[in-house]
Amino acid sequence: MRSEFEKQAVKVFKALGDPNRYLIVTTLVERGELSCADFDDRIDLSKPAMSHHYRILENAGIIDVRKKGLHYYMKANMAVLERFVPGFAHTHLKKK
């Protein structure tokens, strides 16, 4: 039987294993809270496909989503990233 830590670890690594979700997470880590519309020019996917990716990331605990009016805003959950991928921001952000 798997522990809760192991179950969540599997969700986190599966979620980060997709290139589009990885891009969403690294962008949020780099830029802070963003709306869904902020990804329209970064990722060439339909809105339903993007919603699917957001839902997977949220279910894994990697992002937090809040609704304000008609808009959804997301931010990276750094506590979860650091728990499962220590040093994520330092290692995975593009050096400029």
Image (cartoon, rainbow, N blue to C red):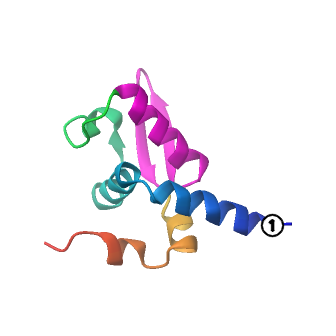
In the rendered view, would you say 31 is above or below 37? below
Which residues lie in the magenta part?
47-76
> Is 81 left or right of 95, judged from the image as shown?
right
**Which residue lies at the image location 51% right of the left edge and 54% below the top edge?**
15
> Is 18 left or right of 93, judged from the image as shown?
right
Across and down, in percent, residue 27 comes to 30, 55
In the rendered view, would you say 53 is above or below 6? above
Which of the image's four quarters has the C terminus? bottom left
Q: Is residue 66 magenta?
A: yes
Taking the view exactly as shown, the residue that stands out farthest to the left is 96
Across and down, in percent, residue 46 comes to 33, 28
**Which residue lies at the image location 40% right of the left edge and 50% below the top edge?**
21
Across and down, in percent, residue 50 comes to 39, 35
> Is 81 left or right of 92, judged from the image as shown?
right
The answer to which image quadrant residue 72 occupies is: top left
Which of the image's four quarters has the N terminus? bottom right
**Could you tell me which secondary element the residue under label 1 belongs to?**
loop
**Which residue lies at the image location 43% right of the left edge and 79% below the top edge?**
87
Taking the view exactly as shown, the residue that stands out farthest to the right is 1
Q: Which residue is mark 1?
A: 2
Say what amino acid the circle numbered 1 marks: Arg
Residue situated in front as seen by the camera: 95 or 53? 53
Across and down, in percent, residue 20 comes to 35, 49
Instruction: Assess disc 1: are there few (<14), some (14-19) or many (≥20) residues with their C-alpha within 10 Å of its C-alpha.
Output: few
Question: So how many labels did they put on this image?
Answer: 1
